Amino acid sequence: MKWFKQTAASVLLLSAIAAQPVFAETEGETIEFTPRTYTGITYNEEVVASSELFKYDSGLNFEYPDAVRGIFVTAHSAGGGRFDTLVDLVGSTDLNAMVIDIKEDFGYMTYMPQEDSELAELGIAQPYIKDPRAVLERMEQEQIYPIARIVVFKDSVLAEKRPDLSFMDNGQVWKNGRGESFVNPFLKEVWDYNVQIAIEAAKLGFKEVQFDYVRFPEGFENREDSLGYSMGEYEKSELDLVQRRVEAVTDFVAYAREQLKPYDVKVSVDIFGYAATLAEAPGIGQNFSKISDNVDVISSMIYPSHWTSYFGIAKPDLEPYKLVAEYAKVENEVLGKLEDPPVSRPWLQDFTASYLGAGNYKRYGKAEVEAQIKALQDNGINEYLLWNAGNTYSEGVDYTP
């Protein structure tokens, strides 16, 4: 049985590149087209052009809000009783969007695919959301803009099932200090796997796909020579290892966006906030400008608790307005250099970072959330998302201060 074979939808837009793993032979199919080359990936121009004439209709209708103001929703919340509470929160405030886990941080799909889906036979799903279509229909009724979050390269599930698609350490799948495994961004089979999950989300009725963990593991520059892994087609590249990683990550984003065009969904990417302050993040392969050039929306994770004193703020968690305002100035400058910049929609902090220790953090609530939103607005950024891992959001917040 093939692990993953390409559907007619995915065949419409790609010519496959066979990866050559180090540890095991993959079983991906190769499809021949006369290609147009885009760095490490290929497209068929005629088929891509024809896709513009057809857009998939999920049967659900959502209007894009005046500006997206959203919250993160776990699959457990979306599939449980807490969903009603979160719908009420959005409906009673100026919030208007939800980012729902469809492929979560371990790598599981969060609902059971239909039996005729190729994803159904892979054993990668958990029934956290019993009826995702019903969830989306409720969101349509309330006109809550639906965004599907897909965690891409952090994927312990796929890494264990297919070690040849991962990174190996002395014959075992490598894990980071938190026990998490990653799959290999160099390999096109990994791209197709995640794109197929994104296509399924679009078919369900999501209007946007948000890719998270679009990167190599943190600190990979310190492990690039000690771990075993394939570089696929990037083995032939004349670029140095840092630039190969940047190219692979950027190519995936561009490729995914092309594959999703027939499904009439926007594509967004979550990215470390500090990536905007560097030419590129050398270990993880994120180049802020290059990724931004290939998405509809860029969502920097700019939680004050996650910063050092980079902006000259000794204890950033204590100064949410100042931190976000300083970041926004940097991002505006970077995006302003792009010919067609994406919408900026940063992730903001609605949680308390007590792990920073006494004197280094403050309890986050209404005032701190509003301060971050106001800092964005004062710098011309009107969209944002709020992160709270437990989906317990601060009460009484004015979301358009």
Image (spheres, rainbow, N blue to C red):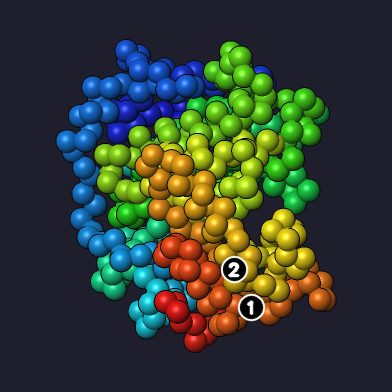
Q: Residue at x 32, y 60 (%)?
A: 133
Q: Residue at x 55, y 29 (%)?
A: 248
Residue 43: x and y, percent?
35, 23
Q: Residue at x 40, y 45 (%)?
A: 341
- Pointer 2 residue: 349
- Examine the rendered structure and indicate whether residue 353 appears above or below residue 297: below
Residue 308: x and y, percent?
74, 58
Crowd rating for badge 2 (residues with CA inside 10 Å; few <14, some 14–19, many 20+): many
How far, Cα to Cα, is label 2 from label 1?
A: 8 Å
Residue 104: x and y, percent?
54, 53
Would residue 187 be found to the left or right of residue 352 on screen? left
Q: Quadrant of residue 21?
A: top right
Instruction: Let me know if residue 32 appears in the view.
Output: yes
Q: Assess whether mark 1 and mark 2 are in contact (beta carbons under 8 angstroms).
A: yes
Would residue 239 be found to the left or right of residue 195 on screen? right
Residue 364's disc is 1
Residue type, mark 1 in image: Tyr
- Which element is circle 2 on? strand
Q: Nearer the viewer, residue 381 or 37?
A: 381
Looking at the rendered image, the quarter that the C terminus falls into is bottom left
Instruction: Give the residue furthest to the left.
Output: 53
Would residue 15 be found to the left or right of residue 398 on screen? left
Q: Nearer the viewer, residue 305 or 100?
A: 305
Would residue 314 be found to the left or right of residue 121 on screen? right
Q: Quadrant of residue 131?
A: bottom left
Residue 94: x and y, percent?
38, 77
Q: Quadrant of residue 320?
A: bottom right
First along the sequence among labels 2 and 1:
2
